[in-house]
Image (tube, helix red, strand yellow):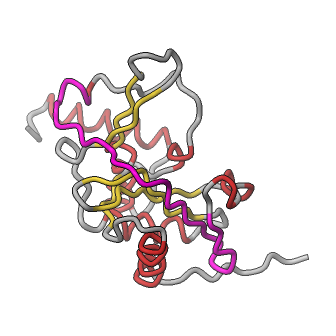
Amino acid sequence: MSKQAITRPALDEALEAWKKCLAENKLPAEPLWIFAENLCIEPADATPGKFHFAFQTRFTPPDEDALEITYDYFSETDARIVFYRLGSHAGKSVCILLCDPWFETKKADQGFLPRDGWKMSFHPGRAGDIEEVTDLTRWVRRVKRIRALHDFDFSMSLETVDQIKLHGRPLMPYERMADKMLTRLRRMFGQID
């Protein structure tokens, strides 16, 4: 039995559908795109095991083409792509692009609106603001591990976007290690600052 081919729309068409979905849900239709490094997850003050979600774009701003590269890369997979809204900030919807088979079982009662013909889902979320972190110390101290898996853990990192731009694909773990070692050697021998 052969797999059915996935027909993904161009990014512009998918973005128009996403903006329409946001507007229909009375949410800001203009997206502000963030990536894994832009998330700022902090322990909630009063409740152990609970977390506060925020974002930043000051310390790791995404390149202008990061969304396009991410969408193109995700579109090459068989996994579901999700346009996910985290909240509102300054009149925009703070959004993150996700991709993983994890989302195949997510349905409307969980806030996911499937577009099965495109093998995508939209998650407009609820009305409400998300805080932008501008304090470097606070961002550096964010929670990176020791928390439950969350939907947005299936986002792309800006480091991976850079690897795709430089090498045409994400690097394998041993390639990342070799790249770091070469950079250190070049610094030691004065070839780079």
Q: Residue at x 29, y 62 (%)?
A: 92
The residue lying toward the viewer, choosing from 170 and 83, is 83
Q: Judge whether 73 appears above or below 158 on screen.
A: below
Write the start and end of the magenta stretch as one range. 113-139
Q: Quadrant of the C terminus?
A: top left
Q: Is residue 156 left or right of residue 112?
A: left
Q: Judge whether 105 appears above or below 114 on screen.
A: above
Q: Is residue 39 left or right of residue 173?
A: left
Query: How many numbered circles are shown?
Result: 0
**Residue 143, quarter of the rendered image:** top left
Q: Judge whether 3 appears above or below 61 on screen.
A: below
Q: Position of residue 75 (x, y in %)?
A: 55, 71
In the image, farthest residue toward the right:
1
Q: Residue at x 17, y 37 (%)?
A: 134
Q: Position of residue 63 (x, y in %)?
A: 24, 60
The residue lying toward the viewer, choosing from 83 and 170, is 83
**Residue 28, quarter of the rendered image:** bottom left
Membership of 54 in magenta stretch: no
Q: Position of residue 4 (x, y in %)?
A: 78, 79
Membership of 115 in magenta stretch: yes
The residue lying toward the viewer, choosing from 153 and 77, is 153
Q: Residue at x 52, y 56 (%)?
A: 98
Q: Position of residue 127 (x, y in %)?
A: 42, 54
Q: Residue at x 48, y 53 (%)?
A: 126
The residue lying toward the viewer, choosing from 63 and 136, is 136
